[in-house]
Image (cartoon, grey):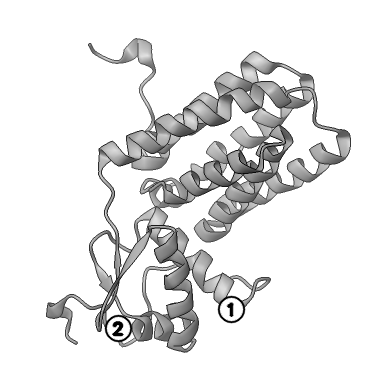
């Protein structure tokens, strides 16, 4: 295959715009997380075909764990298999992303209000550690690590709802969201400031402020169609033109 046929080839230096592999997960998991982060952040582009051998060469691994990872991402709806060619990153319209955000706004903010003041000290310790991981990854510019830590934090917090189906659904919606502004925020050293919002949310939950926790979660999810989507500061509603 040639680049003109739409399949990614390996540059001479074996470098591609994807996050480096982590060291504490299995090879397949590391490849999956790195590819997922590259898709969510837009470094692997919508509509573009990528071959397992090319990606494997970039990672310094065989094509096998890449194919396995891509099959996992296919089930998540992030890529689609193209027979005898490779994998194409699926496209998402603004309307689809808006719908995902709308569903998340229906699910997650009410849970924050419900769990406010109910998380035991041991649970808060775990959540604080996860929030620290998000901030640390943001400061290091590790987008793959940031997205993994963010997903783990919100899944752990949502578990206090006692509804496993809600946790699974919200986590699935989170991994399907495209956040093309993350790279810009990371490169401009603004992602760490945004990451601190997780600690602010925990402060409200620990203090039992249900209304404020609900509203902060609404604003947090709103970043998916604002700050995290574009890398640009959101305009407060009172300043928006009608």
- Residue at the spot 33% in from the left edge and 13% down from the top edge: 239
* Residue density around tag 1, few if under 14, some if 14–19, many if 20 or more, within 10 Å: some
Looking at marks 1 and 2 on the same chain, the residue that comes earlier in the sequence is marked by: 2
Q: Does residue 138 show up?
A: yes
- Residue at the spot 69% in from the left edge and 44% down from the top edge: 156
- Relative to 189, does residue 206 appear above or below in the rendering? above
- Relative to 134, does residue 76 appear above or below in the rendering? below
Q: CA distance from mark 1 to mark 2?
A: 22 Å
Residue 127 sits in quarter: top right
- Residue at the spot 41% in from the left edge and 86% down from the top edge: 57
Label annotation for residue 88: none
Percent coordinates x, y for residue 210 in the rendering: 68, 17
- Residue at the spot 41% in from the left edge and 30% down from the top edge: 102
Q: Quadrant of the N terminus?
A: bottom left
Residue that mark 2 sits on:
11
State left or right for residue 146 relative to residue 13.
right
Percent coordinates x, y for residue 242 in the rendering: 22, 11
* Residue density around tag 2, few if under 14, some if 14–19, many if 20 or more, within 10 Å: few
Nearest to the eye among marks 1 and 2: give it.
1
Foreground pick, 202 / 90: 90
State left or right for residue 70 relative to residue 210.
left
Tell me whether the residue at label 1 lies in contact with that at label 2, contact meaning CB atoms closer than 8 angstroms.
no
* Residue that extends furthest to the left in the rendered view of this protein: 4
Residue 222 sits in quarter: top left
State left or right for residue 135 relative to residue 218.
right
- Secondary structure state at the residue bearing disc 2: loop
Percent coordinates x, y for residue 133 in the rendering: 67, 51
Label annotation for residue 27: 1
- Relative to 195, does residue 144 appear above or below in the rendering? below
């Amino acid at each position: 295959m040639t680049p003109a046929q739409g399949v990614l080839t390996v540059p001479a230096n074996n470098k591609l715009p994807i996050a480096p592999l982590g060291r504490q997960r299995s090879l397949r998991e590391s490849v999956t997380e790195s590819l997922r982060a590259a898709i969510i952040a837009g470094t692997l582009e919508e509509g573009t075909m990528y071959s397992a051998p090319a990606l494997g060469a970039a990672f310094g691994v065989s094509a096998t764990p890449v194919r396995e990872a891509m099959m996992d991402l296919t089930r998540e709806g992030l890529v689609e298999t193209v027979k005898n060619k490779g994998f194409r990153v699926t496209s998402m319209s603004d309307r689809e992303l808006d719908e995902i955000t709308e569903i998340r706004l229906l699910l997650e903010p009410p849970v924050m209000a419900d769990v406010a003041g109910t998380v035991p000290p041991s649970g808060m310790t775990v959540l604080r550690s996860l929030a620290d991981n998000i901030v640390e990854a943001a400061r290091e510019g590790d987008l793959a690590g940031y997205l993994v830590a963010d997903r783990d934090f919100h899944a752990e917090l949502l578990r206090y709802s006692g509804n496993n189906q809600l946790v699974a659904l919200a986590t699935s919606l989170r991994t399907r969201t495209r956040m093309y502004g993350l790279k810009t925020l990371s490169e401009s050293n603004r992602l760490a400031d945004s990451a601190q919002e997780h600690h602010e949310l925990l402060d409200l939950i620990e203090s039992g402020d249900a209304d404020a926790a609900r509203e902060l979660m609404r604003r947090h999810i709103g970043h998916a169609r604002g700050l995290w989507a574009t890398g640009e500061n959101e305009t407060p509603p009172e300043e928006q033109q009608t």
